[in-house]
Image (tube, helix red, strand yellow):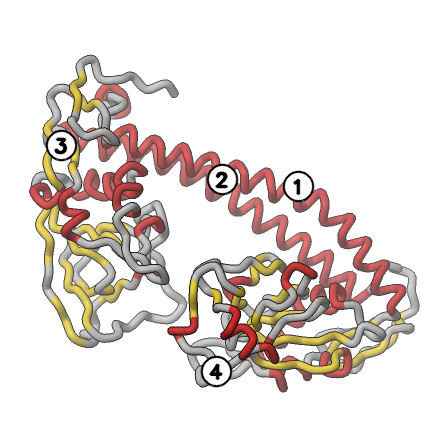
Amino acid sequence: MKWKPYPKCKDSGVEWLGEVPEHWEIYRLNKSVRLVNEKIDGPLADVLYLGLESVEPGTGRQLEPEVPLQPEGTSNRFQEGHVLFGKLRPYLAKATIAKTHGTCSSEFLVLDPTLLGERVLLYWLLSDGFLKQVDSSTYGAKMPRASWDYIGSLPVPLAPETEQTQIAHFLDRETAKIDTLIAKQQRLIELLQEKRQALISHAVTKGLNPDAPMKPSGVEWLGDIPARWAVTRLAFCSSGIRTGPFGSDLHAEDYVEDGRPVINPANILSGQIVPDPRCTVDEKTAYRLSSHWLTRGDIVVGRRGEMGRCAVVGPEECGWICATGCLRISPNQSVALPDFLQLAIQSQRVREWLSLQSVGSTMENLNASILGRVPLPLPPIVEQAAILARIAKQSVSIDDLIGKANTAIALMREHRTALISAAVTGKIDVREAHQAAHA
């Protein structure tokens, strides 16, 4: 829909804000809200605690953690109706409205709305122009954060109270429509990924020939396998399974920006290694850790979190460092192709087996012994190559559909961000749309 501009505007006097409606005022944020600075040491019984991970980026929605979060050290107290804004890495757009009283990470600013309504304040904190200004002020290379002195000094365009309510209702309604469409695309991606996973799991356990003679595998969850295949353990398909450097070998002060990448489970995404330029070490440290270098054809496996998360090391990733949170498999390529082993480890049945066997009370945690005991159906090398070729061919159309869905999601999120910014800065007049929606 083409939204109308306001009939009369004026120069805000702020370059990045541009013009605002003529009847709006410009205030500093610290004159529009009250900073709540009530500190609590340690956890409080039966009181909600919100960490940064409790808030979905860009939407203001609160997430339910798998394991209840507990504060570490000092936390901030908040009341229902307060608005929390994450000052750590503000580009992540972590802001939310408190639904009840509780405590939160000290990386949240707790704001009590005074001149701004809580919904409009939330949308303002999530607006693109505001976040860019806050991001430009951050300090600290590894954990960039912004200060309240700077954030509080930023200008806020202030509409009359009735109009603030209209803007909030308009954005609630329009962003809900966008979020519904995004959720549908995300569900489509999940279904496509499940389809691909089913194709992979069947191929690496049953092969490509539906008429092939079968035999019992001797492993209950594997069932029958092709008669020509063997059943082995992952350890027998490799020349070694090793962990990354432990805390005594790699310290927090060893990390630099834009150095040699250190690969953690978070860097293994959709079967690919995606380095973080902020999680690297200098060359001196890298050479000290040379025994943990990744080599071409290695499989790096996440020890924690999602079981079965792994990737094959390519030529450009040689010399990167396997972190403590990962295990490094060196495949015996005369027995098993690295890409085939990767698919086998990622298969649903192996993931389930790893979850049952993993150790750790609050988080699944693998070690080399557990990983080495994974039972694997192993076809001849020629058949492994044929399976890889078939899966690659079948994955092309699935990946194309996933790519289109991801593009659609990105465009909708851009539209959502632009709509919020336009409404809270007065670039569009939503009063007529609000009246029509409530007619």
Tell which tag, 1 or 4, sits nearer the viewer.
4
Can you give x and y, in whole percent of width and height, for residue 409 in the image?
A: 49, 39
Residue under label 1 = 400
The Cα–Cα distance between marks 4 and 3, rounded to whole angstroms, is 54 Å
User: Looking at the image, is mark 4 or mark 3 earlier in the sequence?
Assistant: 3
User: Looking at the image, is mark 1 or mark 4 earlier in the sequence?
Assistant: 4
Residue 94 against residue 248 in the figure, above or below: above
Q: Residue at x 45, y 85 (%)?
A: 248
The Cα–Cα distance between marks 3 and 2, rounded to whole angstroms, is 31 Å
Residue under label 4 = 249
**Neighbourhood count class around disc 3 (C-alpha, 10 Å): few under 14, some 14–19, many 20 upward:** many
User: Looking at the image, is mark 2 or mark 4 earlier in the sequence?
Assistant: 4
The Cα–Cα distance between marks 1 and 3, rounded to whole angstroms, is 45 Å
Tell which tag, 4 or 3, sits nearer the viewer.
4
Q: Label 4 is placed on what type of residue? A: Asp
The Cα–Cα distance between marks 1 and 4, rounded to whole angstroms, is 43 Å
Q: Nearer the viewer, residue 430 or 428?
A: 428
Mark 1 and mark 3 residues within 8 Å of each other at the beta carbon:
no
User: Relative to residue 358, is residue 414 drawn left or right?
Assistant: left
Residue under label 2 = 409
Residue 73 against residue 168 in the figure, above or below: below
**Neighbourhood count class around disc 4 (C-alpha, 10 Å): few under 14, some 14–19, many 20 upward:** few
Q: Nearer the viewer, residue 432 or 281?
A: 281
User: Relative to residue 301, is residue 228 drawn left or right?
Assistant: right
Q: Is any atom of residue 383 visible in this view?
A: yes
Which numbered disc covers residue 158? Answer: 3
The Cα–Cα distance between marks 1 and 2, rounded to whole angstroms, is 14 Å
Which numbered disc covers residue 98? Answer: none
Can you give x and y, in whole percent of width and height, for residue 299 in the image?
A: 67, 70
Q: Residue 358 occupies which quadrant of the picture?
A: bottom right
Can you give x and y, in whole percent of width and height, for residue 348 in the image?
A: 65, 66
Q: Nearer the viewer, residue 420 or 161?
A: 420
